[in-house]
Image (spheres, rainbow, N blue to C red):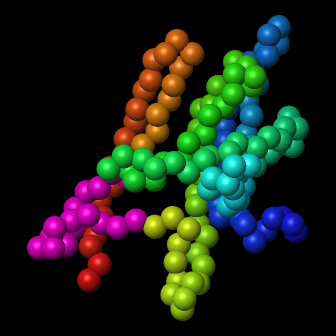
């Protein structure tokens, strides 16, 4: 934190079950710290440091920023390499992005969004988040989350 603290943009938790051959499965409850950064080729990324003390574990998941679809114009994509193996089964992943900063005299948020309602309306529903899971056999599952929102005047 002493070295990377200014780049901190979020935190969270990860719960998983670890399955190692010839051993009983065990639970992992890890903490997450998210840092603003770039990949080696200069793409924007959120580097998520996953760590726990019991069992001791530490690794980094890069979430690379990609242009998304019309409903989700920005996508954070993390690909867990096959070299990790079939060991962890993620049960819960929570990441709260929270950084605010000042630029040109105005306060901004690291992640911002608008409420896409027509001018005559004051509230509506909007897509909030989407998760896509890809499995080794080629199957894909997509989960969308919709939230209500209010237009600001």
Instruction: Residue 37: name its quadrant.
Output: bottom right
Residue 46 lies, in percent from the top left, at 65, 54
Residue 19 lies, in percent from the top left, at 74, 18
Residue at horizontal 29%, vertical 59%? 148
Front residue of this view, candidates 77 and 5: 77
142, above or below 85, in the image: below
Answer with left or right where residue 99 lies relative to residue 51: left
Q: Where is the C terminus found, in terms of image quarters?
A: bottom left
Whether residue 131 is visible: yes
Q: Residue furthest left?
A: 120
Answer with left or right where residue 128 lies relative to residue 81: left
Q: Residue furthest bottom?
A: 105
Residue at horizontal 63%, vertical 53%? 43
Q: Residue furthest front?
A: 41
Magenta extent: 113-129
Answer with left or right where residue 116 lies relative to residue 66: left
């Amino acid at each position: 934190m002493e070295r990377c603290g200014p780049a901190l943009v979020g935190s969270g938790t990860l719960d998983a079950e670890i399955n190692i051959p010839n051993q009983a499965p065990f639970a992992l409850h890890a903490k997450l710290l998210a840092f603003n950064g770039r990949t080696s080729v200069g793409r924007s990324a959120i580097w998520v440091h996953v760590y726990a003390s019991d069992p001791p574990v530490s690794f980094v998941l890069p979430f690379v920023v990609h242009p998304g679809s019309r409903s989700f114009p920005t996508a954070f994509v993390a690909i867990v390499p096959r070299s990790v193996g079939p060991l962890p089964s993620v049960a819960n992943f929570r990441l709260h992005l929270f950084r605010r900063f000042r630029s040109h005299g105005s306060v901004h948020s690291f992640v911002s969004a608008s409420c896409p309602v027509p001018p005559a309306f004051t509230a509506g529903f909007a897509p909030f988040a989407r998760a896509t899971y890809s499995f080794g056999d080629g199957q894909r599952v997509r989960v969308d989350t919709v939230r209500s929102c209010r237009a600001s005047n």
